[in-house]
Image (cartoon, rainbow, N blue to C red):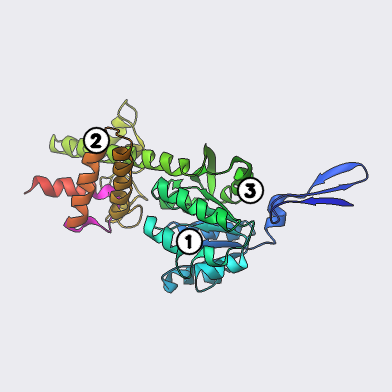
């Protein structure tokens, strides 16, 4: 039997009796641990879906209490990103911001302190594309491969394994990344070289913020004109004004079940994170001399919301913010 083996256990081929047989990369991978760093609202359900698909998970978080839920369903918890890198040759990070990613990769207990040659590093955080490129350079120096793969879909999609991943990195490594990401998402899309995944994500979130503010303004105006919000939403969703913020994530309490507006805007995608993403979009727009008047205004609105007690509420709470503003 002749065998050719490539990076880690992601591609293994055997030949016998003049026939080729492919050993499923997923079945091989199921015997190999996957590292996961960052167990917040998104990271925990994502890591759970890896476990459900047969992948042993080695996990850590800067807040040890965040690890308990995943530990209870079978994950092995360690103390630091470096410890994860020592035990796994495929690692996914899901962190709040660029500084968190820099610390997790390059800090004193960071991944790059103990990373093994050939390790695949996938960052699903939403960060500055320039930081993604910096991490890729650092990983390459250690003989590892870094890919950016931010997500869209929110906590609901994370729980159901229906996220959309926007992947940037070496095209020849895309299949290896897709193997893992398809356990957590319904769509895994290759965007180009490192940083392009982040670029797509920032464009998406800028449009999401603009759309949510527009939906909130529209619903508020309709209510002020005496319209029933459920009726208004129904008509919008069969008309040209239809959008994700109106038909899937409506910001008005009582219009939809199972969304943050039905739960006092708890859970979901926090206002602080939206303000952060809009800040990244603003920075990239400035650097590329791209006019984004509505994106800039959305950034200002969400920054004001953060200072007015909405920081930890879902970003759809912009509807409540507008209602309170009209009373001042």
- Which mark, residue 105? 1
The part of the chain drawn in magenta is 308-317
Residue 237 within the magenta-colored segment of the rendering: no
> Dot 2 lies on which element?
helix
- Which mark, residue 259? none
Gap in Å between the C-alphas at discs 1 and 2?
Answer: 34 Å
Q: Callout 1: few (<14), some (14-19), or many (20+) C-alpha neighbours within 10 Å?
A: many
Q: Residue at x 46, y 63 (%)?
A: 106
Q: Is residue 6 above or below residue 240?
A: below
Residue located beneath label 2 in the image: 294
Query: Does the magenta stretch mainly form a helix, a strand or a loop?
Result: helix
Image label count: 3
Q: Given this view, does label 1 or label 2 mark the residue nearer the observer?
A: 1
> Dot 1 lies on which element?
helix
Q: Callout 2: few (<14), some (14-19), or many (20+) C-alpha neighbours within 10 Å?
A: few
Q: Residue at x 54, y 55 (%)?
A: 139
Q: Residue at x 42, y 63 (%)?
A: 103
Residue 282 location, x and y as percent?
Answer: 29, 42
Q: Quadrant of residue 41?
A: bottom left
């Amino acid at each position: 039997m002749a065998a050719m083996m490539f990076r880690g256990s992601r591609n293994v081929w055997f030949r016998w009796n003049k026939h080729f047989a492919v050993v499923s990369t997923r079945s091989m991978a199921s015997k190999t641990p996957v590292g996961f760093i960052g167990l917040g609202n998104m990271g925990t359900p994502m890591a759970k879906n890896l476990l459900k698909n047969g992948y042993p998970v080695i996990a850590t978080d800067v807040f040890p209490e965040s690890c308990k839920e995943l530990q209870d369903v079978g994950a092995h918890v360690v103390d630091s990103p470096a410890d994860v890198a020592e035990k796994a040759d495929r690692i996914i990070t899901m962190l709040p911001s660029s500084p968190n990613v820099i610390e997790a990769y390059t800090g004193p207990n960071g991944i790059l302190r103990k990373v093994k040659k050939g390790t695949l590093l996938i960052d699903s955080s939403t960060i500055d594309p320039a930081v993604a490129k910096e991490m890729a350079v650092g990983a390459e120096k250690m003989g590892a491969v870094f890919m950016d793969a931010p997500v869209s879909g929110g906590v609901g999609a994370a729980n159901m394994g229906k996220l959309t991943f926007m992947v940037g990195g070496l095209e020849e490594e895309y299949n290896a990344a897709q193997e893992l990401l398809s356990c957590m998402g319904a769509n895994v899309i290759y965007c180009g070289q490192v940083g392009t995944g982040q670029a797509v994500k920032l464009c998406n979130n800028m449009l999401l913020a603009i759309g949510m503010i527009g939906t909130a303004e529209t619903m508020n105006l309709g209510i002020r004109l005496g319209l029933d919000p459920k009726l208004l939403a129904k008509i919008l969703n069969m008309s040209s004004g239809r959008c994700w913020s109106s038909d899937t994530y409506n910001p008005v309490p009582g219009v939809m079940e199972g969304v943050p507006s039905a739960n006092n805007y708890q859970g979901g995608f926090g206002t602080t994170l939206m303000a952060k993403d809009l800040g990244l979009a603003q920075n990239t727009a400035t650097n590329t001399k791209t006019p984004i008047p509505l994106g800039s205004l959305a950034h200002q609105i969400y920054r004001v919301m953060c200072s007015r007690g909405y920081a930890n509420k879902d970003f759809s709470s912009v509807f409540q913010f507008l209602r309170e503003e009209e009373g001042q």
